[in-house]
């Protein structure tokens, strides 16, 4: 990922591109709304297009299938992770704070209901194609977290006794493990559980053992 300061100035977004982005977002949002109310397997493209108020042909201009809509959410989540990393490096924010922020930002949308989270899990593992979409997203997220941890290591915040790749992978496992357990254990607050687990994770990689300064 290119540091913010090294990125070229963004080109103005034209009306056509804005319109395409709005339609794409409407389809994704309509899908998520349906997935929060009914089973993923019972949700059809026709239901999605009706909820999004677009034609079926329009849907297929943006997505090849229902499963690919889930990749749209992954793109959003990845953008949030990359933005958080860029801001942390640019503003020299504490790494623990940034890791915690990443977890909460990533869990915000799917964590709105257990039904939605369960359906996202079902959808992402419903086919090899869906798993490929998820795998691609996870690898990019790992790359962003690795960049943050390398920067943190240079600042002396993170230990070097474990590879950055391993540290980043364990961080992703915290998110995936907590969200899966949250689905099957009613009564547990997702964000509170994330806070507890990130504290333990940080203690395992912090140069000072995670002690408060």
Image (spheres, helix red, strand yellow):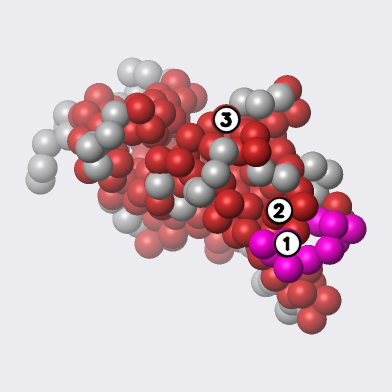
Q: Nearer the viewer, mark 2 or mark 3?
A: 2
Q: Which residue is mark 1?
A: 50
Q: Which residue is mark 2?
A: 47
Instruction: Tell me the magenta residue range.
Output: 50-59
| Residue depicted at x 84% and y 63% | 55
Mark 2: secondary structure: helix
| Residue depicted at x 73% and y 79% | 12
Which of 111 and 198 lies nearest the eye of the viewer?
111
Q: Which residue is mark 3?
A: 122
Q: Is residue 54 visible?
A: yes
Q: Which quadrant: the C terminus?
A: top left
Q: Earlier in the sequence, mark 3 or mark 1?
A: 1
Q: Are marks 2 and 3 in contact (CB under 8 Å)?
A: no
Q: Residues within 10 Å of mark 3 (few under 14, many from 20)?
A: some
Snapshot quadrant of residue 79: bottom right
Which of 25 and 97 lies nearest the eye of the viewer?
25
| Residue depicted at x 44% and y 59% | 87
Q: Residues within 10 Å of mark 1 (few under 14, many from 20)?
A: some
Q: Position of residue 183 (x, y in %)?
A: 38, 32
Mark 1: secondary structure: helix
Predominant secondary structure, magenta span: helix
Q: Are marks 3 and 1 in contact (CB under 8 Å)?
A: no
């Amino acid at each position: 990922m290119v540091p913010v300061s090294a990125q070229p100035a963004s080109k103005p977004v034209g009306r056509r591109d804005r319109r395409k982005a709005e339609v794409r977002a409407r389809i994704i949002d309509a899908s998520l709304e349906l997935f929060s109310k009914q089973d993923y397997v019972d949700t059809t493209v026709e239901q999605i297009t009706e909820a999004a108020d677009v034609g079926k042909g329009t849907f297929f201009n943006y997505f090849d299938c229902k499963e690919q809509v889930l990749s749209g959410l992954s793109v959003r989540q990845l953008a949030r992770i990359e933005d958080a990393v860029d801001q942390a490096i640019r503003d020299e924010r504490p790494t623990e704070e940034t890791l915690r922020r990443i977890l909460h930002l990533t869990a915000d949308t799917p964590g709105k209901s257990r039904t939605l989270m369960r359906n996202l899990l079902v959808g992402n593992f419903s086919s090899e194609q869906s798993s490929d979409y998820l795998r691609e997203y996870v690898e990019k997220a790992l790359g962003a977290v690795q960049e943050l941890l390398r920067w943190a290591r240079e600042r002396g915040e993170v230990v070097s006794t474990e590879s950055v790749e391993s540290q980043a992978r364990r961080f992703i496992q915290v998110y995936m493990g907590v969200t899966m357990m949250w689905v099957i254990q009613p009564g547990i607050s997702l964000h509170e559980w994330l806070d507890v687990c990130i504290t333990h994770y940080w203690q395992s990689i912090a140069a000072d053992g995670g002690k408060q300064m």
